[in-house]
Image (spheres, rainbow, N blue to C red):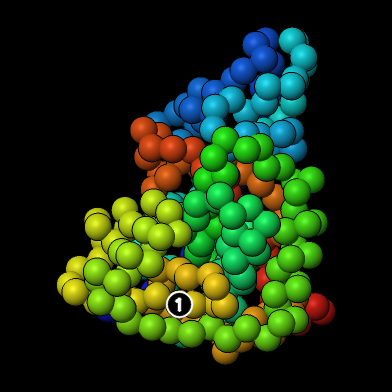
Amino acid sequence: MSEPAVAPRKPHRITTKIDWWRAAVQAAAVSSSASPGKGTPALSTRIPMPANGPLSTSTREGQSTRVHILDDPMPDYGEHEATDDPLQVLRHSTAHLLAAAVVELHPEAKYGIGPAVQDGFYYDFDFGGKSISEADLPAIESRMRRLAQADIPFVHEVLPRKQAIEEFAKRDQIYKLELIHDKVEGDEVSVYRTGEFLDLCRGPHVRSTKDLKAFKLMRVAGAYWRGDEKKPQLTRIYGTAWQTQRE
């Protein structure tokens, strides 16, 4: 099931000034006005940003702020996998670690995809309308470090398609079920287990969470599932990871 690896592309950064004349400004409106013709990229901002709906419901009328629009290419299923580059493998594994930590802290969370990208990684989550901001990142990072220290192996399994569907269905992971339906061909599905956490993935990964020692969560953004503005807007958590702290 391996495909040639797609090299991560550096996102374009556009900074625009937004005047909050209304309390609720939709992400799509900001994107289309600042980056016309480019679809709806991820929006990274220092203000609170709910998983669904407006960028902020707490800004005062007439208040201005700056929003960074990160035009990240949205990789399709499998495009970020099947690379032997050690740093990309490490970052992809750290994305899995992030998702495992989020699910422990927020059992209701639904997880989308988590690729390695330029200088780091991200993972997209649906928190069911719960607002997640950069203030939540220290707690998530702390849980990641606890899981890293636990020396949990990354275990590759190839499941019969029916079993894979059952596994993700009992976890209520609707985005993984959609990917299996739309993107996985044949009767076998490649997954990775990290303790209780299960992800749809072809790898490769590091041997254990203990191999992940130098990482940091950086920011929160919003991104439509599979890059489609007609689909749910998810919360994207960005991080960076390196072989050593010195890097």
Q: Position of residue 120 (x, y in %)?
A: 62, 65
Residue at the limit of the structure toward the front, as seen here: 170
Dot 1 alpha-carbon crowd within 10 angstroms: few under 14, some 14 to 19, many 20 or more: many
Residue type beneath disc 1: Tyr
Location of residue 229 (image quadrant): top left
Q: Residue furthest left?
A: 186
Mark 1 secondary-structure assignment: strand
> Which sits in the foreground, 214 or 186?
186
State the image coordinates of residue 40 (x, y, percent, origin top left): 46, 36
Tag 1 residue:
192
Q: Is residue 86 left or right of residue 112?
A: right
Q: Position of residue 118 (x, y in %)?
A: 58, 63
Q: Is residue 212 above or below residue 143?
A: below
Up-down relation of residue 125 to residue 25 (above or below): below
- Residue drawn at x 72%, y 59% is 140
Q: Residue at x 49, y 38 (%)?
A: 233
- The reply to whether residue 11 is in sight is no
**Does residue 8 appear to the left or right of 55 in the view shown?**
left
Q: Residue at x 57, y 35 (%)?
A: 129
Q: Residue shown at 43%/84% (left/top)?
A: 156
Which of the image's four quarters has the C terminus? bottom right
